[in-house]
Amino acid sequence: MNSCLYECAVFHRRLAPKRHEFLYRVFYFLIDLEELPALDRTLRLLRINRPGLYSFRESDHISHGAPSARENIVRYLRSQGVTAPVGRILLLTLPRVLGYIFNPISVYFCHDTEGKPLTSVAEVGNTFGEWKPYLVPLAADGTFHARVVKHFYVSPFSDLDLEFDFRFHPPDAGLRILIDDYRGRDRELISSLTGERVPLTDTNLLRFSMKYPLLTMQVILGIHWHALLLWLKGLPARRKESDPELQRGVHRPHKSLANHPSSCAHSDQTNQRS
């Protein structure tokens, strides 16, 4: 199968207005959207669109009115002017863990019908249960690269008109996801997600469950902790309600998800890119 796991290191270094950095370890899923039925049949610890220890739900991702994650991402690509036929789509993401979902970043790696890299899409999430997609095209050097204005509330310590600089390497034996924040020519935040490929099996899921217990809950707790440290360092926190005009193209959870824990983490002191 193309689907696999990546054992990863997440690194953040804030350069301004206060220096702060951290590194922690997690594991990510890379899911071939064509393999969802096979994964549901062959794995006991990962369930597709139903409850389980680990659960991948298509409704947790980009919604453009289609019933499947693949159709929704294709519709998004069409809305962004990508007209080439789309073949295989690989999604780098975190699943639900015991029903709880929090995804700081998911990345769609889209291929053409001949299997060649076509484009990618970054799906950035925040602690309000919102997410925003960004098209990250294929660059001449074989990576996926884009620099775009955020226009999205991901951190109370960062302005909404900063620019994301995305650079993704196609996933293979290794994973390399780079996301920096820029103010003009000045880089304010360095972020990376790097890892090594591991087969997606029940044995490895059980091993990682013991090594990284309650994965998504550890991520959200870490976010709160480092946000608190930034606040103690004297960084002013911007309330989400203060700049509604700068929050554009944001996808919000369906009403049916309104009471889900991931939709209720409304703390102005937290973010996934501290």
Image: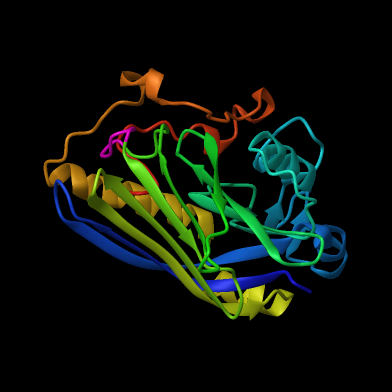
Q: Nearer the viewer, residue 90 or 234?
A: 90
Q: Position of residue 176 (x, y in %)?
A: 48, 69
| Image quadrant in which you'd find residue 62 | top right
Taking the image as shown, residue 220 lies to the left or right of residue 84, namely left
Q: Position of residue 158 (x, y in %)?
A: 28, 39
Residue 157 drawn in magenta:
yes
At a point 51% along the width and 68% down the height, the residue shown is 141
| Image quadrant in which you'd find residue 191 | bottom left
Taking the image as shown, residue 174 lies to the left or right of residue 266, namely right
Q: How is the image coloured?
A: rainbow
| Image quadrant in which you'd find residue 237 | top left
Residue 55 drawn in magenta:
no
Q: Position of residue 212 (x, y in %)?
A: 50, 69
Q: Nearer the viewer, residue 231 or 4?
A: 4
At a point 80% along the width and 58% down the height, the residue shown is 87
Taking the image as shown, residue 111 lies to the left or right of residue 151, namely right
Quarter placement of the N terminus:
bottom right
At a point 34% along the width and 33% down the height, the residue shown is 160
Q: Position of residue 190 (x, y in %)?
A: 30, 58
Give the magenta part as a residue range. Answer: 156-161
Taking the image as shown, residue 120 lies to the left or right of residue 151, namely right
Chief secondary structure of the magenta portion: loop
